[in-house]
């Protein structure tokens, strides 16, 4: 990789759109995150509706795992870089957010991650409102999220990225390198809520539907 290519603060490149093959402008924006290092944010939007966004961490490309105990209101402010290759887990809630083929990256904080989970849960709960067990579980998770954002309940937020382009920026974050086997086991595709051996799936196009079965 030619690192001189990334020294500009921002620039554009042009490539054929993978859907309509017209000229697609890729916007590159460099940023420096204190106590972490340089990243490159890449985005593109075509008139045909194709969109792309991702982040590249310029200082490290090894498969990494970040584990953040969320115990106080201050922990909700910890910055999160989630690339298109990053998987987010909240084990206490049985929640996994896996990347898909058209998922987008974003830079947010722990509270922003929880707000995204809450939005999906609220929509999913409407799909299962006539299924008593699943609906009750979705409401339980929503109450749990509210307690976390009020500082009344502790959870753990984990981000794993086989390409090393995701991170949690906090002194409390536990950082470990993934083994080759662990990196290869990371899946892609959808957001899954494990609701007592049943699943509610959120696919990459934000079409949410309940999936029955054990």
Image: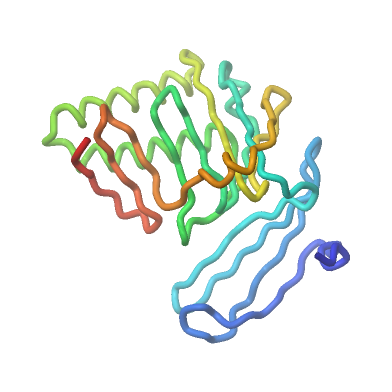
Residue 28 placement: quadrant:
bottom right
Q: How far from the left and from the top, in percent, is residue 121?
A: 33, 37
Task: Decide which of 106, 86 is in the foreground and name it.
Answer: 86
Q: How far from the left and from the top, in percent, is residue 120?
A: 36, 42
Q: Residue furthest left?
A: 130
Q: Is residue 26 left or right of residue 3?
A: left
Q: Residue furthest bottom?
A: 22
Q: Is residue 41 left or right of residue 192?
A: right
Q: Is residue 67 left or right of residue 58?
A: left
| Quadrant in which the C terminus appears | top left
Residue 141 placement: quadrant:
top left
Which residue occupies 48% across, 72% down? 50
| Quadrant in which the N terminus appears | bottom right
Task: Decide which of 65, 76 is in the foreground and name it.
Answer: 65
Which residue occupies 61% across, 47% down? 162
Q: How far from the left and from the top, in percent, is residue 185?
A: 51, 43
Q: Is residue 169 left or right of residue 204?
A: right
Q: In the picture shown, does residue 83 fall above or below 74?
A: below
Q: Residue furthest top?
A: 152
Q: In the picture shown, does residue 63 fall above or below 55?
A: above
Q: How far from the left and from the top, in percent, is residue 199?
A: 28, 38
């Amino acid at each position: 990789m030619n690192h001189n290519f990334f020294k500009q603060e921002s620039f554009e490149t042009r490539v054929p759109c993978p859907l309509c093959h017209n000229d697609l402008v890729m916007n590159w924006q460099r940023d420096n995150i204190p106590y972490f290092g340089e990243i490159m944010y890449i985005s593109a939007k075509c008139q045909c509706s194709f969109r792309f966004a991702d982040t590249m961490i310029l200082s490290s490309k090894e498969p990494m795992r970040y584990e953040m105990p969320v115990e106080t209101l201050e922990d909700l402010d910890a910055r999160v870089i989630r690339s298109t290759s990053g998987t987010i887990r909240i084990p206490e809630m049985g929640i996994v957010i896996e990347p898909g083929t058209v998922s987008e990256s974003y830079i947010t904080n722990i509270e922003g991650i929880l707000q995204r989970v809450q939005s999906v849960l609220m929509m999913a709960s409407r799909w299962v409102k006539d299924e008593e067990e699943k609906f009750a579980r979705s409401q339980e998770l929503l109450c749990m999220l509210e307690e976390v954002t009020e500082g009344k309940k502790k959870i753990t937020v984990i981000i794993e990225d086989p390409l090393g382009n995701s991170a949690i920026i906090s002194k409390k974050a536990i950082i470990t390198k993934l083994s080759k086997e662990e990196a290869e086991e990371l899946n892609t595709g959808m957001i899954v809520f494990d609701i007592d051996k049943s699943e509610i799936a959120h696919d990459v196009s934000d079409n949410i539907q309940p999936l029955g079965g054990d």
